[in-house]
Image (cartoon, rainbow, N blue to C red):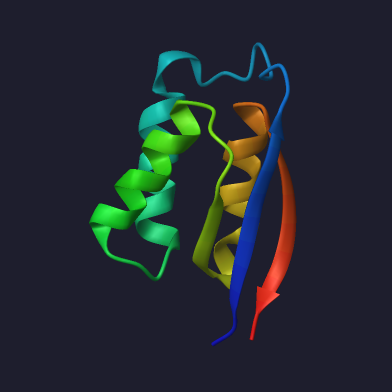
Amino acid sequence: MRMSILKIVGWKKPVEYSGWGEHINVELRRRLRSSLDVSPRVAKTYAKKAIAKEYFTIHGIKENELESIAQILDLIGAEIIFEQDD
């Protein structure tokens, strides 16, 4: 199975009125845990970095889950670039 890489290269203003409210961080952690082919500890580290608005690269995203991760990151204001892991 091919894995995808997602790079967070910047941050913009988060989407307001997305309907998620205070639960968006919980949803981000849930999606990362279920969508990555990494240990739960690594997924938790990625979530903490995203919540802290850091620049980082997410490795090991299952190809069929890429859109789900991109959607939630876009809602919190991430500017992202996709790559395929060989």
Q: Is residue 7 left or right of residue 79?
A: left
Compared with 6, 84 (above or below) is below
Q: Is residue 11 above or below residue 79?
A: above
Residue found at x 44% / y 36% = 49
Question: Is residue 13 left or right of 23 when viewed as pictured?
Answer: right
Q: Quadrant of the C terminus?
A: bottom right
**The one of 82 and 9 positioned closer to us in this rendering:** 9
5 sits left or right of 44 in the view: right
Q: Position of residue 29 (x, y in %)?
A: 37, 41
Say which quarter of the image contains residue 12: top right
Residue 66 is situated, as x and y percent measured from the top left of the image, at 61, 60
Please identify the quarter of the rendering in which residue 57 is found.
Answer: bottom right
In the image, what residue occupies the spot 53% across and 33% down? Answer: 54
Q: Give the total number of marks visible in the rendering.
A: 0
Vertical order, 2 against 19 (above or below): below
Say which residue appears at 66% left-offset and 19% top-offset.
14
* Residue under the point 53% across and 57% down: 58
Q: Quadrant of the N terminus?
A: bottom right
Where does the image place residue 52, in percent across and percent down from the top left?
A: 46, 26
* Residue at the farthest front position: 55
Above or below for 41 versus 30:
below
